[in-house]
Amino acid sequence: MSALDKMWLSFYAMGFMAISMGLIYTSRYKLKNRIIKFVFALTAYTLLIISFIAMIYLVFNGPTGGA
């Protein structure tokens, strides 16, 4: 994976984290319907797990060796 691809992957992971933060806040404090709360929370935690895996990959893959 090139350095530019790693940059885009890190941006996507940070975006997923921001979206999950908003979805968790919405599901906990703004919604009253239990089904919609569950769907929002499930989506948020799924995005959070995906971003966690992406960040672990980026951290342990290391820098690229190009000039």
Image (tube, rainbow, N blue to C red):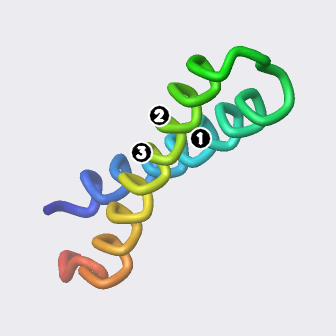
The quarter of the picture where the C terminus appears is bottom left
Q: Identify the amino acid type marked 3.
A: Thr
On residue 43, the disc is 2
Kindly identify the residue that appears in the image at 49 percent across and 52 percent down.
48
Number of dots carrying numbers:
3
Q: Position of residue 25 (x, y in %)?
A: 77, 36
Asked if the residues shown at circle 2 and circle 3 are in contact, with their CB atoms under 8 angstroms apart, the answer is yes
Q: CA distance from mark 1 to mark 2?
A: 8 Å
Kindly identify the residue that appears in the image at 68 percent across and 39 percent down.
24
**First in residue order: circle 3 vs circle 1:** 1
44 vs 56: above or below: above
Nearer the camera: disc 1 or disc 2 = 2
On residue 46, the disc is 3
Please state if 33 lies on the left or on the right of 1 as rendered.
right
Please state if 29 lies on the left or on the right of 9 as rendered.
right
Q: Identify the amino acid type marked 1.
A: Ser
**First in residue order: circle 1 vs circle 2:** 1
Asked if the residues shown at circle 1 and circle 2 are in contact, with their CB atoms under 8 angstroms apart, the answer is yes
Q: Position of residue 58 (x, y in %)?
A: 33, 71
Q: Position of residue 20 (x, y in %)?
A: 59, 41
On residue 20, the disc is 1
**Number of residues whose C-alpha sits closer than 10 Å to that of mark 3, classed few (under 14), some (14–19) or many (20 or more):** some
On residue 3, the disc is none
